[in-house]
Image (cartoon, rainbow, N blue to C red):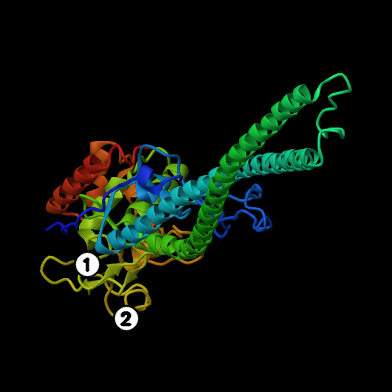
Amino acid sequence: MPTPTLPRHPRLTVRRLAAAVLTLATLLTLVALPADADAGDPSAPAAADPTPLIMGGALTVPDGGVVPIGLLVPDDTLDPRLLTLELSGTGWARAAARLEEMLARRTTLERRVGATRAEVETTTSELRDVTAELDRARRERRHLAATAADVDALLADRAVHRFVGLGSADPVIDPGPDLDARRQAELLDTVQADLLARRAELRRRAASIDGEIDELAARRRALATDRAAARSRLEELAAESVEVEAALPGLVDAARRARRGAVVAGTDLPLVAVDAYLKAADRQAGVAPACGVAWWQLAAIARVESRHGRLGPADLGPDGRVSPPIVGIALDGSAGVRRVVDTDGGALDGDPVLDRAVGPFQFIPETWARWAVDGDGDGRLDVQDIDDAAAAAARYLCRLGGRLDTAGGWRRAVLGYNASTAYLELVDLHAQRYRRALASALAP
C-alpha cells in the first residue's frame, strides 16, 4: 500500500521574495543613514549612501516569474535536478513557510527603505529650495528696510527745513535763486508727496515680504521635522534589517535539513532516497555505460524491499542512514524462505547462525561483501546507508541483467535479485510509476 503523501507546500512567487540567489554570501550589511552633520542647517544635502540595504544576498532572485523555494536554499550535496521538485511533508512545509515569511519581510523592508530614502532626498531638496527662497526674501527685506530708513531720513530733514523756513537749502532739491517763494514751495511739496508715497509703498512691500518670510520659515521648519522623522524611520528599518538578516541563515539551514527529510510531492519517494538513486545510476553509467541502469529501477527495488528505508519502525534520515537498522528474518529454510547459513559471523546482521537480509536494499551479508560500494564517499561501506546500498544495488543488478535498458535484461536482473514472478511484476509496476511521475523533472 503506497505511503500517503502530505499536502504540498505552494511554490513561491519571486515577486513576493523580491530581489532575490543561490549562495549565502552577504548577510550583515546595514542601512547607511543620511549624515546628521547638517543638524544646524536643515537645507544641507544628506550624505551619499555607501552601502545598500542587504536585500541582495544568497536568497535574492530577479523580479518576476515563479521559482520553487528549493532553488533558494543551496545544497551542494544534492543532485541539482532535485532543487526544482515540489515537496511534501509537514517539516518541510513549516520550514519553507518560515523562510518565505522572512524573505517577504525582507522584501517589504527593501521597499520601505527605498521609499524612505527617497523621502529624505526629496525633503532635503525642498529644504534647499525653501532655504534659498527664505534667504532671498530676507535679503530683500533688509534692502527695503535700508531704503525706508533713507526715505524716513529725507522726510525728517524736509520737516526741519520747512520749520526753519524756505531761505535755507532744501535737503532734497536746491531750487536755486531764480524761483520765487511760491514756486519753490510747490516744488518742495511735490517732492515731499513723492517721498511719502515712496515710504508707503516700501511699507506695503515690507509687510508682504514679512508674510512671505513667515510662511517660508514655517515651511522650512515643517520640512526639517519631516526629514528628521524619515531619518528616524530609517534607523528603525536598519535595526529591523539586522534582525532579519541575523535570522535568515538559521532559517535557510532549517529549510535545508527539512528538505532532505521531505517526500517528492505526488509520490512516496523521500528526496534523499531519490538523490541516492540518481547518483548510483550516474556512477554506474560511468563505470559500466552499457548497462543502462536507471534511477527509477533502483527506486522500484528499494520500494519493494524496504519502502525506501522506512519499513516498520525504521526511518530514513536526512543523512541517508536508516535508523533503527533494517534487519530481515532469519533465512532458516522455512516456507517461502531459502536457508542461508551464516557467512559473516553475525557481523552485519547480528546473527552468528543464519544470515539475514539487511539495509534498504536487503542484501544478505555474502552478497554485500562482494558488491559493496562507498556511494557517498565517506570512507565507509555501510549497508544501512542508502547511498552505499543504492550504488551496490546498481552494480549488482548490472551484473545480473547485463543490459537493464532492455526488457530482457531488466527481467533477468530483477529475477536474479529475487526469483519470484510476483516480485518482478510488483517491482516493474513501481518502476514504471516512478518513471512516469518524474520523467520530465529528472531527465538526464
Q: Please state the horizontal and vertical placement of residue 355, each as a whole percent of the image.
A: 28, 73
The residue tagged 2 is 352
The disc, 1 or 2, on the residue closer to the chain's N-terminal end is 1
Q: Please state the horizontal and vertical placement of residue 263, each as a whole percent of the image.
A: 27, 56
Residue extending farthest right: 177
> What amino acid type should be assigned to the residue bearing mark 1?
Leu
Mark 1 Cα shell of 10 Å, populated few (<14), some (14-19), many (≥20): some
Residue extending farthest top: 178
Camera-side residue: 37 or 89?
37
Q: Residue at x 24, y 38 (%)?
A: 408
Q: Is residue 391 visible?
A: no
- Mark 1, secondary structure of its residue: loop
- Mark 2, secondary structure of its residue: loop
> What amino acid type should be assigned to the residue bearing mark 2?
Pro
336 with respect to 53 (left or right): left
Is residue 304 placed above or below 219 in the rendered structure?
below
Q: Please state the horizontal and vertical placement of residue 317, each as a whole percent of the image.
A: 34, 67
Mark 2 Cα shell of 10 Å, populated few (<14), some (14-19), many (≥20): some
Q: Residue at x 83, y 20 (%)?
A: 179
Is residue 201 placed above or below 294 in the rendered structure?
above
The residue tagged 1 is 311
> Quadrant location of residue 211?
top right
Is residue 385 placed above or below 332 in the rendered structure?
above
403 with respect to 113 (left or right): left
